[in-house]
Image (spheres, grey):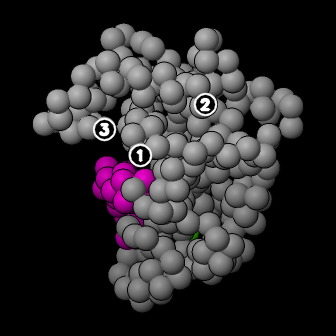
Amino acid sequence: MTALRPILIVEDDAALRATLAEQIMLAGGFHAVEAGTAAEAAAKLDAGDARYDAILLDIGLPDGCGREFCAKLRRDGKRMPVIMLTGADAERDVVRGLDAGANDYVAKPFRAGELLARVRAQLRVFDNSEDAVFTVGPYVFRPAAKLLLEPARNRKVRLTDKETNILKFLYRAAGKPVPRQVLLNGVWGYNSSITTHTLETHIYRLRQKIEADPSRTRLLLTSAGGYSLDAQAGQEAAAAAA
Ligand code: CA
């Protein structure tokens, strides 16, 4: 199963919102969630263990202002990329939006391709930042801290540099199998003399740390000459138990 990255679209223009959601889904790798008001967006963000990898935020909402919404998100410690959707010629909106903690903006009318390019660019920056947080099975993965947190069992798993990089590389492949040599080059670099045996050793240790039963792997799978990460494995069970 592919781990789709959830994007929250906050826009009161229903037609524009639906088009955006459709384009985002069609782009692949994303799952779009829609909110028509600031209140609806706040409710979605606060719901249970909801997590959004990026937010597209209209400035003019019926029950509030996108800038203030963004400023509040930042005050609440939410760090995901926020891209403002601004009216045409709204230069002051843009400056104030960025001041409020937005990462980027696009002026209406915009092409979906341009917006998606900006979303991807912001996600790339974010994924490499100290603030990046990913969900991997029952874990919250913080690459910068080389940590996996398992909230349900109040447990911390410490990872080595290589284990962190292996997990990050597989996560970015979004569930697709990564051939051993590609993973090796991605984690150790093209010029390394490391063999796939070394990679297999690291995978073995990583499985001992993250799999509930390392003899029956559910997260880090062997597939098609390489490995894949099923970041959604075990989440249904965790949700049912909650
Ligand atoms: Ca609006």
Q: Which residues are magenta?
A: 107-127
In the depicted view, which residue is nearer to us: 168 or 87? 168
Report the predominant secondary structure element of the magenta stretch.
helix
Type of amino acid under label 3: Val
| Residue 226 visible in rendering | yes
Q: Judging from the image, what secondary structure is the residue with disc 2 in?
A: helix
Q: Earlier in the sequence, mark 1 or mark 3?
A: 1
Whether the residues at callouts 3 and 2 have beta carbons within 8 Å, the answer is no
Question: In the rendering, at what x and y percent does residue 137 appear?
Answer: 63, 33
Residue displayed at 70% across by 31% down: 235
**In the displayed structure, does residue 172 sit left or right of residue 68?**
left
Q: CA distance from mark 3 to mark 2?
A: 19 Å
Magenta residue check for 119: yes
Mark 1 crowd level (few <14, some 14–19, many ≥20, 10 Å Cα): few
Residue 180 pos. (x, y %): 30, 21
134 to the left or right of 203:
right
Give the x, y percent position of residue 136: 59, 37
**Splitting the image into 4 quarters, where does residue 12 fall?**
bottom right
The correct choice, above or below, for 219 with respect to 223 in the image is below
How many residues crowd around disc 2 within 10 Å: few (fewer than 14), some, or many (20 or more)?
A: many
Respond yes or no on whether mark 3 lies under 8 Å from ligand 1. no
The image's mark for residue 161 is: 1
| Residue identifier under label 2 | 210
Lower sequence index among marks 3 and 2: 3
In space, the residues marked 1 and 2 are separated at their CA atoms by 15 Å
* Picture layout, residue 187 above or below residue 222: below
Image coordinates of residue 91 in percent, x first then y, are: 37, 85
Q: Residue furthest left?
A: 191
Which kind of residue does numbered mark 2 sit on?
Ile
